Image: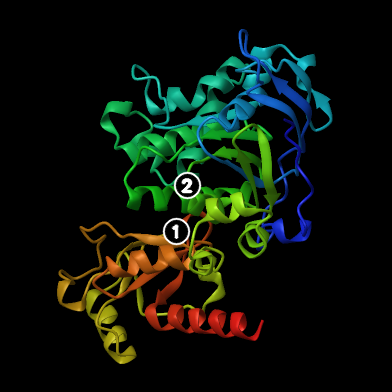
Amino acid sequence: MSITGDTPTDPTAAQPADGSGEVSGAELVLTDVVKLYPGQKVPAVNSLSLTIPAGEIVMFIGPSGCGKTTSLKMINRLIEPTSGTITIDGEDIRGKDENELRRHIGYVIQGGSLFPHMTVEKNIGIVPKMLGWDSARIAERVTDLLDLVGLDPDRYRHRYPRELSGGQQQRVGVARGLAADPPVILMDEPFGAVDPITRQRLQDELISIQRELRKTIVCVTHDIDEAIKLGDRILILQEGAKVAQYDTPEAILSTPANDFVADFVGAGSSLKALSLARVTDVELRQPTTARIGEATEEVRRRAEANGDRAVIVLDARGRPQGWPWLRQLKGDTIVAPDQELVDVDQRATLNDALDTMLSSSHGAAVVTGDRDQYLGVVDFAAVTAQIRAMEEAQDDG
């Protein structure tokens, strides 16, 4: 049975929301790709044809045994195709040495898969070193990438994987996948081994990174909600190596191609549509902010004049560090609060925003943009207003 990928019904819908970054990814084309393992009569992948546009995230999803991971691994030849053609930016991957090919394709797997005997810096710099980069260039790249994935370079570059949390290890794994600035990144269930809160945060960070870098990312997942949240397009594979649907999340939710897709997406697709609504769709509130080092009394007066009982503390680069109540402000000057602030990216889903609000004593969530820059606050009133507007639009439709 063949696998074929049709062009999504609305190619323009898959473009990143703000188009802020220039596309640095490459078009990926699979043509009649087959994988037949020795001793098997039925191919694991049979005649897969698929075009993945440059600069987009495409999510591979389907039941166990459908060929999604096999298809992913054939792109960097961790699994050799039996036949067919795979091209990156028009160049056949079979024309390159397999090790050279892999050095130019980022690869991120569950848990980060870091070398335990190497520091964070050496883990990230391993591929650039193989490519002949000098030490100064590697060090600069490590600094930039740690900053990109939300880890303080001075604090984390000399640590070992055992000194990191699971989420931090996964961030380093993403940084390592980006280290040599490859046009294509492959991800095999990268966030499957972390807790739900960390998973949401890592997904948001990937969205933020992609907004800036615009790589071509192919990601295998088992979670339809993750596919809807992250994917510009989703490839749903059916048992028996058949493409059930290849389309935008909007199209898959509104017009599933067949009963398999409808069942796979599951009941309550209208609720899943909340995953299509983003924080950028709602109006952000602008409560009082304070910079580290400001006079405490001045900040307190400003907050009280605004009718706020708390302030959002920002560092010198405009990144939120905490959201303390006025009664918690001590000393002559504002310092970084001794608390972890859970924020959401501006492209986070309303579902994620609601989850974050429920865990916040403020009943709202701090919103960040590129490189964790503070943008404002989203609250229940704004989200519920957006939900009502969506429901009214559905009723009118």
Q: Residues within 10 Å of mark 1 (few under 14, many from 20)?
A: few
In this figure, which residue is indicated by the disc labeled 2?
A: 223
Q: Nearer the viewer, mark 2 or mark 1?
A: 2
**Pick the front one: 362 or 321:** 362
Q: Secondary structure at mark 2?
A: loop
- Residue 334 in sight in this render: yes
Image quadrant containing the N terminus: top right
Residue 331 place in picture, x, y as percent: 15, 69
Image quadrant containing the C terminus: bottom right
Q: Secondary structure at mark 1?
A: loop
* Left or right of 247 on screen, residue 125: left
Mark with earlier residue (2, 1)? 2
In this figure, which residue is indicated by the disc labeled 1?
A: 317
Task: Name the amino acid type tagged 1.
Answer: Arg
* Left or right of 50 on screen, residue 361: left
Residue 264: mark: none
Name which residue lies at 47% across and 47% down.
223
Task: Name the amino acid type tagged 2.
Answer: Asp
Residue 327 place in picture, x, y as percent: 15, 77
- Residue 179 in sight in this render: no
Name which residue lies at 26% across and 74% down.
295
Residue 274 place in picture, x, y as percent: 50, 68
Name which residue lies at 65% across and 23% down.
74
Identify the image quadrant of residue 343.
bottom left
Q: In the displayed structure, would residue 326 be above or below residue 99?
A: below
Q: Residues within 10 Å of mark 2 (few under 14, many from 20)?
A: some
Is disc 2 in contact with disc 1, using a CB cutoff of under 8 Å? no
**Pick the front one: 214 or 69:** 69
